Image: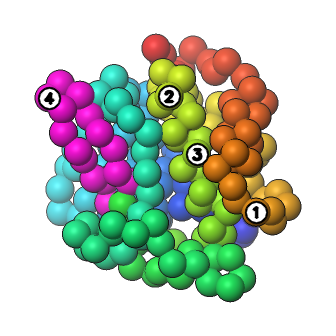
Amino acid sequence: MGEGRTHLGPLELTDGHWGVGDATRPGTHWVEFRPDGLHQHEPDSEGRSVPWSRIMTGIGITWGKHSWNTSSRGIYTLRGAVASRDGGWMHMTLRHPYENDLLRFDQHARPYRALDALRLEYLLRQLIDEGKPHLLGDPEWVGRAVAHLAGGKERWATYRALRRVAAEALAAAGPGGAAAGA
């Protein structure tokens, strides 16, 4: 991993909490996984929360500084890293009321392996599809899933392979603890 930290692309454990984006630098945007849902941290704001029960379709990740400029899935280097250094966005569809939503995150100084970012996205999708997003609020469960997904061999990232490895991570991480809630 890197510098004694546990991470999977932009997902990192910081002070016992999992989040997407750089939570260690002041004045950044990042998304925290809490027992009750996602929490968007923003500079000069208390942020906002999205309960797990409102997320109805899988979470997609795009790269870029501006939300209107994120229609592409991203640009990657020849060495298999995310090329953009401008941050990213988590896209999702919410229910009650139905709406598309975006959560912004700023990138860490370290580069993200494209394969790790794709594995994270497919893990998020799998959890939503199976009705288990609340497991992301259990730091121990997320740690087990990340341990299964992080590193690993560089392989072609086909849809089938990504779905398979996400399902394997769910099985390897187990059913989740009491902290996750339902």
Front-most of residues 30 and 104: 104
Image x and y of residue 4, in percent: 73, 62
Image x and y of residue 131, in percent: 48, 21
Cβ–Cβ under 8 Å for marks 3 and 1: no
Q: Earlier in the sequence, mark 1 or mark 2?
A: 2
Q: Which residues are magenta?
A: 90-104
Q: Earlier in the sequence, mark 2 or mark 3?
A: 3
Residue of label 3: 122
Q: Is residue 127 left or right of residue 37?
A: right
Front-most of residues 121 and 143: 121
Front-most of residues 88 and 27: 88
Image x and y of residue 179, in percent: 53, 20
The kind of secondary structure element at disc 2 is helix
Q: Is residue 137 above or below residue 2?
A: above
The numbered disc on residue 156 is 1
Residue of label 2: 129
Residue of label 4: 97
Q: Is residue 21 left or right of residue 154?
A: left
Q: Main secondary structure of the magenta part?
A: strand
